[in-house]
Amino acid sequence: MAQLGLDLGLLLSQLANFTILVVILSMVLYRPIMAKLSERAERIQKGVEDADQAADLLDQAKQEYDQHLADARSQAREIIEQATRTGEQQRQEILAQARQDAQQIIQRAHHQAARETVERRVALSQQVVDIAMASTERLLESELTMAKQHAVIQQVLAQAEDELLALEPKHTIERGETHL
């Protein structure tokens, strides 16, 4: 190798120096740098995993929120429907009570009208009796001919009929309606 201009001893010493340098550098620099790089890669991987896990938790929380919101809306609909049913039931009960009260008022009015009619008929009968008595007294007080008696009786009956019409109720109540 001398022909090439290389000294074998120097080449071997440089090769030994290079090997020692590589071993020292690998121990001092390469392994710590690789350990740091590996540690950094692990931290990055953990950060990515944590981010994925956080995204999963966020999705899960959003799904739970949506479910709770749907449940709340469903409960609100049920409450509204129940309130509507309760309101309708109360309305029906109030209407039934109002109909019953109206029917009782109508019955009382019918009874009152019937009682008043009976009272008027009794009063009219008494008046007819009084008129007949008065007519009879007039007939007895004066001598009348048959035609005069007939005319007086017609007059008394017409007067009784007029009083009967005057005593008839001016209105009647039928089926809860007032007719004039």
Image (tube, rainbow, N blue to C red):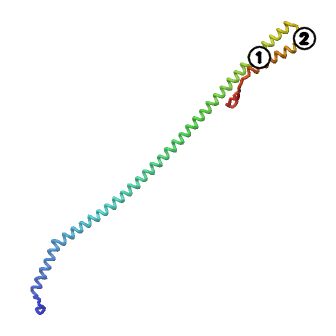
Instruction: Tell me if residue 72 comes above or below residue 29 in the rendering.
Output: above
The quarter in which the N terminus is drawn is bottom left
Q: Secondary structure at mark 1?
A: helix
To which residue does mark 2 refer?
145
Asked if residue 134 lies left or right of residue 108, the reply is: right
Kind of residue indicated by mark 1: Ser
Q: Front-most of 160 and 122?
A: 160
Q: Nearer the viewer, mark 1 or mark 2?
A: 2
In this orientation, which residue lies closer to the viewer: 180 or 22? 180
Q: Residue at x 73, y 20 (%)?
A: 167
Where does the image place residue 16, in percent across and percent down from the top left? 12, 81
Q: Are marks 1 and 2 in contact (CB under 8 Å)?
A: no
Q: Amino acid at mark 2?
A: Thr
Find the residue positioned furthest to the top: 141
Of the residues under marks 1 and 2, which one precedes in the sequence?
1
Image position of 91 (left or right of 114): left
Relative height, residue 4 to residue 58 (above, below): below
| Distance between the alpha carbons at the discs numbered 1 and 2 | 27 Å
Q: Residues within 10 Å of mark 2 (few under 14, many from 20)?
A: few
172 to 48, vertically: above or below: above
Judged from the image, the secondary structure of the residue bearing numbered disc 2 is loop
- Residue 15 in the figure: left or right of residue 107: left
Q: Which residue is at the front of the view, 125 or 23?
A: 125
Question: Who is closer to the viewer here, 2 or 136?
Answer: 136
Residue 105: percent from left, percent from top:
64, 28
Residue drawn at (67%, 23%), measured in percent from left and top?
A: 112
Residue under label 1: 125
Residue 8 location, quadrant: bottom left
